[in-house]
Amino acid sequence: MASSISTKLFLGAPDGSARLGSLQSPQMLPSPGLKLPARRSQSRRLEIQAAGSTYGTYFRVTTFGESHGGGVGCVIDGCPPRLPLSEADMQVDLDRRRPGQSRITTPRKETDTCKIASGVADGLTTGSPIKVEVPNTDQRGHDYSEMSLAYRPSHADATYDFKYGVRSIQGGGRSSARETIGRVAAGAVAKKILKQYAGTEILAYVSQVHSVVLPENLVDHESLTLDQIESNIVRCPNPEYAEKMIAAIDAVRVKGDSVGGVVTCIARNVPRGLGSPVFDKLEAELAKAALSLPATKGFEFGSGFAGTFMTGSVHNDVFYMDEHGRIRTKTNRSGGIQGGISNGEIINMRIAFKPTSTISRKQNTVSRDKNDTELIARGRHDPCVVPRAVPMVEAMVALVLVDQLMAQYAQCMLFPINPALQEPLEQRKSEQAQIPL
């Protein structure tokens, strides 16, 4: 069998000739029959393919589609086989995310009905990539004609042009929150895996709208339920503060303006040991995932910035032994993670969302041809994004935890565990579905 040798060329020698790389000794000159490529008159133009649409290592999710294109969706790679899965499992969370739910969300009418195109057979996942598709049906591309000429302040219009030199005008394209449909669909699968395997529950709710802040002591994270969160259109589990938040959104909605807010997310029954030291700490992964959502501007974990006002003696979570012989902490200012690794307590975090950039009030801006101008944006937009962001946050947290669960299983569960220090990952094995083979 013939062998081949790859040589590295260094162009631009003083005499204009091409010379072989340093791996070849001076005595190893090219033979007369060896033909070297002619030197280009112009340097080759580098072309960079855009990335950034995939998240995860073991449970990998890629989203696709634009706001006003043919549709959106995701491809899930790495989903374990033999998991019962149907469109209905995803549709619950997609319905929570979809537009047109109430007067405080965008009036765009989309059913966001999903279809599983691959990866499931006879109601069970096959282990192959799962493709989920959601068509766009209520498109009004003409609403964005002004935005094709002028940049919306604080929106991604300008930066997409700065980066790519071209962009999808209608609805913001990939920068639109409609891209998150793929995340929510994949997150529903991740939540099902976590629930069946370890009894893990992930719940998010609105804890602030503009200046209306829900006091932390009014929500019991141990007993919080999805029904409490979904009991009102703003997704705040406290009825009194929910009404105040709705009034705050209504006040700016009728003026063509917008407000921001905060989503709090908790994860209960998370197995111990998830996350890795140094660069891949669990809270760092959660922060990256949460801040990848549109309109996010801040992330707090555990005690967050409030912890900076405490002393170590006050902030430290003291250990104790519970009635089941498990090591627990009396407080949870660490937010369920210490040293980048989950400790079994409730994981809690808060994500700040800015006011919606696209508003129907006149604003000064600059056109694509670099002239000062004014813009009154048309289209249908949320006066406050936080009510619909709740299932988006849950989805991203689920994607992180399921990816870390698989990583922990791969690294630390191949051999018998040390029962004196470790716990099996299956916290609620009796609740797992029995899948006939």
Image: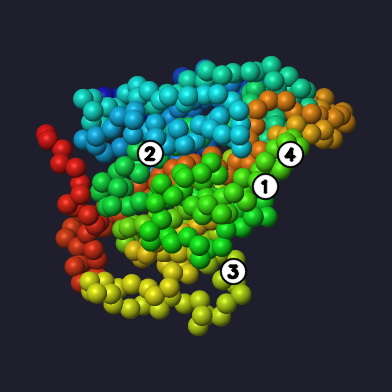
Residue 387: give x, y in percent of width and height: 55, 43
Q: Earlier in the sequence, mark 4 or mark 1?
A: 1
Secondary structure type for disc 4: loop
Camera-near label (1 vs 2) is 1
**Whole-percent x, y for residue 173 in the image:** 60, 27
| Label 4 vs label 2, nearer the camera | 4
N-term mark: 1 or 2 = 2
Q: Nearer the viewer, mark 4 or mark 1?
A: 1
* Residue at x 47% of width, y 26% of height: 112
Observer-side mark, 4 or 3, equals 4
Distance between the Cα atoms at labels 3 and 2? 32 Å
Locate the C terminus and report the quarter of the image it occupies.
top left
Q: Specify the quadrant that holds the N terminus.
A: top left
The label on residue 192 is none
Q: Secondary structure at mark 2?
A: helix
The alpha-carbon separation of the residues under discs 1 and 2 comes to 30 Å
Judged from this view, the residue extending furthest toward the right is: 372
The local secondary structure at tag 3 comes to: helix
Taking depth in this image into account, of 388 and 131 the one nearest to the observer is: 388
Amino acid under disc 4 = Asp
Rounded to the nearest whole Å, what is the CA distance between mark 4 and mark 3? 30 Å
Labelled disc at residue 248: 1
Neighbourhood count class around disc 3 (C-alpha, 10 Å): few under 14, some 14–19, many 20 upward: few
Type of the residue with mark 3: Ala
Where does label 4 land, which residue?
257
Q: Which residue is mark 2?
A: 188
Q: Nearer the viewer, residue 74 or 46?
A: 74
Sooner in the amino-acid sequence: mark 4 or mark 3 = 4
Give the x, y percent position of residue 105. Answer: 60, 35
